[in-house]
Image (cartoon, rainbow, N blue to C red):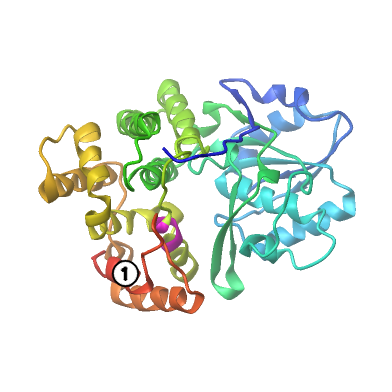
Amino acid sequence: MKNFDFYNPTRIIFGKDTIPELDKHIPFGAKILMCYGGGSIKKNGVYDQVLKALDEWEIHEFGGIESNPDYDTLMKAVHLGREKGIDFILAVGGGSVIDGAKFIAAGIPLKVGDPWNVVTGDRKVKIGEAVPLGTVLTLPATSSEMNDTSVISRRVTDEKYGWRSDAVFPVFSILDPTTTYSLPEKQVRNGIVDAYVHVIEQYATYPVNGKLQDRQAEAILLTLQDVAEGALSMPPNYDSRANLMWTVTNALNRLIGKGVPTDFATHAIGHELTALYGLVHAESLAAVLPYLLWYRRDTKGEKLVQYAHRVWGIHGDGEKVIKEGLNKMTDFFHQVGMPTKLTDFGIDPQEAAERISERFSDRGTRLGERKDIRPKDVAAILKMSQ
């Protein structure tokens, strides 16, 4: 097992009717910037619950944060936050809203330099350099409610990057499964697939004798497979949604990836598919992951065989078992309604391969747990997705 440093300061308040507890976790007198997306929280009652819980606080609202939050939109919130003297940010929504709130939290205090440098990694944000934030989660998918990661798009330049900082771990996150009851089936599906891919990227690398991490990762995968049908059923089932919400949060709260090699190449490629073609995040991942794993079966073979054995009960060894395990994975994605080919989304794999590999070549990008996935490999992977 590799050496590691694990830090996660986020308090989780989980369960039905927990939104009224907001007043216990935000300093009294704080000027709050409440961030949200397209307004669904005003239809499902979450908005009213938040305002009622914080009726003695000064609240300023910023709505309209997009799926794949856009830099230009978020900069409007940064300017608002500076103008109003905001000292606490409350993100009410899913991963995109929370990711956007993290950027806003880092951007408000930034006095010198271009805030975009935070996203590109040229400007590192340290603990104490961001406005504190909390979240009320309404769409389980990204684990942003319990991690240090944010992904921001810049549509005018067709860019999308992920960035990290300990400074933007949420102080707390409220997870009430009933807030998911109004979600469209497609968004629940996307959350399931997004979380599944998060786990695979921290698991399907090479063995380092991280026994607990492997078992924890496998438990999350098995639970996602077990609760998916119930989570997609209507009317919503509380236990299924509760198990889904907590499982998704654990998929990328940084615990299972400590002490083991990780490979977020699928995410890096998926970000480019979103930036260039507008593909929904989870869709981009599903159109890349199975092909990347098969392409890298020589270096990932031991863990892919272990995945087939432990997660799907497939016995044996070698490429046949790896293929069967990956087929089971794609079958699972299909069962929850997720296509797994670029051609399913009307994207030409050849064109995508050329455009994305050229971008990575220009940037000198190297991906994978060994940093040996080169632009030509990315092109080969994308060409398989048809």
Q: Is residue 276 above or below residue 67?
A: below
Q: Is residue 14 above or below residue 353?
A: above
- Residue at (82, 55) in percent of width and height: 80
Q: Residue at x 70, y 45 (%)?
A: 167
Spot occupied by residue 306 in the image (x, y as percentages of width and height): 23, 38
Asked whether 152 falls inside the magenta stretch, the response is no
Q: Is residue 370 visible?
A: yes
Residue position for label 1: 377
Amino acid at circle 1: Asp
Q: Residues within 10 Å of mark 1 (few under 14, many from 20)?
A: some
Q: Residues in magenta?
A: 265-269
**Where is 355 relative to 289, above or below?**
below
Q: Quadrant of residue 188?
A: top left
Any part of residue 38 in sight: no
Residue in front for this viewpoint, 125 or 240: 125
Seen from the viewer's position, the closer of residues 364 and 240 is 364
Residue 219 location (% of width, % of height): 35, 29
Q: Is residue 216 left or right of residue 110?
A: left
Q: Residue at x 38, y 73 (%)?
A: 375
Q: Is residue 365 left or right of residue 100?
A: left
Residue 196 picture location, percent across and down: 37, 42
Quarter holding the N terminus?
top left
Percent position of residue 240, x then y: 40, 25
Left or right: 95, with 194 as reference point: right
Q: Secondary structure at mark 1?
A: helix
Res. 238 image quadrant: top left
